[in-house]
Image (spheres, rainbow, N blue to C red):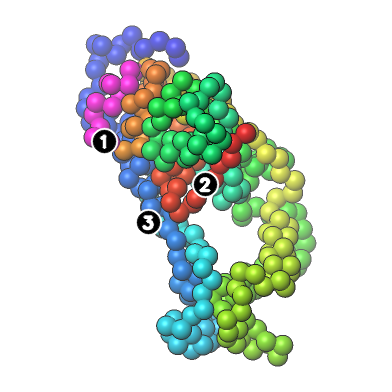
Amino acid sequence: MDSPNPGYDMDPMGHEQLLARNSGLLQLLPSLAEGLFLTETPYNALLKHLEQESSNAFNLEVQELRKKVVALTDGGTNVAESKEGLIQIDEDKNIVLGLTFGTTFLEAMAIIAEEHECIQVDVRGKPEVKDKQELEGLIQEYLKTLKVPRELQKCFLKFTVNQRIASNGQKRRRTQMKEMDNTEKLVFTKELNDLEIRQMLYKVGLSYNNEGSLIRAGDIALDTDDSYKKFTEPRIQQLREKLVPNATTTEHHMVDLRNWYCDCNEYQECYGHDEGRILDVESLLASYSGPNPVMNLFTECPSRILDPVPICCHLLTIVIIACNGGVLGKRWRLV
Ligand SMILES: [Zn+2]
């Protein structure tokens, strides 16, 4: 639809109704997206993983391994940890966001997990900067505050979000597996689980010796060990690829963040709902209390906005990354 609903003035929307329609996006999302990703020490991540594995399958082997890890590290007080923290997801926030945004949120999380630099930024026009480094700094600032820096006010920033999909057109899911023999699937899954545990042990300075016993590896150069980089990491990557759907293709979706627009079907379909109304930004924001990064974005939006506000996994990806820049780091590149 391209004009306001003619019945709007005669049947004004109640305060509560307006709150309910967009509160997920304007209030819940910014408060929960921040801190959705946490950095966990490799030791804590390993113990959590072993606890989960042993309780899931009542796996005695894993329970034994957990006991050995605790003993070898004096209960976690004597750990030669890799400096690399591991990124974990806050499960409570994850659940609430999943319930609020459904598959849109799951797809956004898949995009973030799939590719490190999942966003490309193309700056059109003449930014008021002296070099590329300054430009990158300003984009990073924009992606943190969602407020366009003064130097970029006259530019058009085109964001492209990459999304991998299976070749049959379905969105890629980690639970989908290639058509392969069941025995083969089990063998690969077991090898992957073992290597992932080995990788986690390695990051806390533990390793198997030639006799297959778990030992303290001492002060090995955790982040530079050649055999680890040459064998374990590539093999894990190879197995993960084997266990996901056949061929995948990458879709590229164009996002105009300032106008809260995306070219994907999910976004376009929001305009097909009969109850949609077009609002100016002040009316849209009047019922909400800010500031927060998502409200910053709408405050600066030059267009009128459909209510309920359209949303898609690509816009959500950018907002989630913006709210977690400190942990996720730079997830975009300039083109
Ligand atoms: Zn989209």
For the residue carrying disc 1, how many other residues have a C-alpha within 10 Å: few (<14), some (14-19), or many (20+)? few
Taking the view exactly as shown, the residue that stands out farthest to the front is: 130
Q: Is residue 286 left or right of residue 92?
A: left
Say which amino acid is labelled 1.
Answer: Gly
**Image point (70%, 90%), residue name:** 211
- Of mark 3 and mark 1, the one earlier in the sequence is 3
Say which amino acid is labelled 3.
Answer: Asp
Which quadrant of the structure image shows residue 311? top left
Q: Is residue 72 above or below residue 317?
A: below
* Residue 58: numbered disc: none
Q: Is residue 115 left or right of residue 136?
A: right
Image location of residue 95, percent across then percent down: 41, 52
Q: Secondary structure at mark 3?
A: helix
Circle 2 or circle 3, nearest the eye: 2
Would residue 58 be seen by someone viewing this image from the given angle? no
Q: Toward the viewer: 258 or 225?
A: 225
Establish whether ligand 1 lies closer than 8 Å to the Cβ of label 3: no
Establish whether ligand 1 lies closer than 8 Å to the Cβ of label 2: no
Image location of residue 229, percent across then percent down: 69, 67
Residue range corresponding to the magenta coloring:
279-291
Which residue is under mark 2? 330
**Image point (65%, 84%), residue name:** 208
Cα–Cα gap, marks 1 and 2: 26 Å
Q: Secondary structure at mark 1?
A: loop
Q: Toward the viewer: 18 or 236?
A: 236
Which residue is under mark 1? 290
Magenta stretch encompasses residue 168:
no
Which quadrant of the structure image shows residue 91? bottom left
Which residue is under mark 3? 92
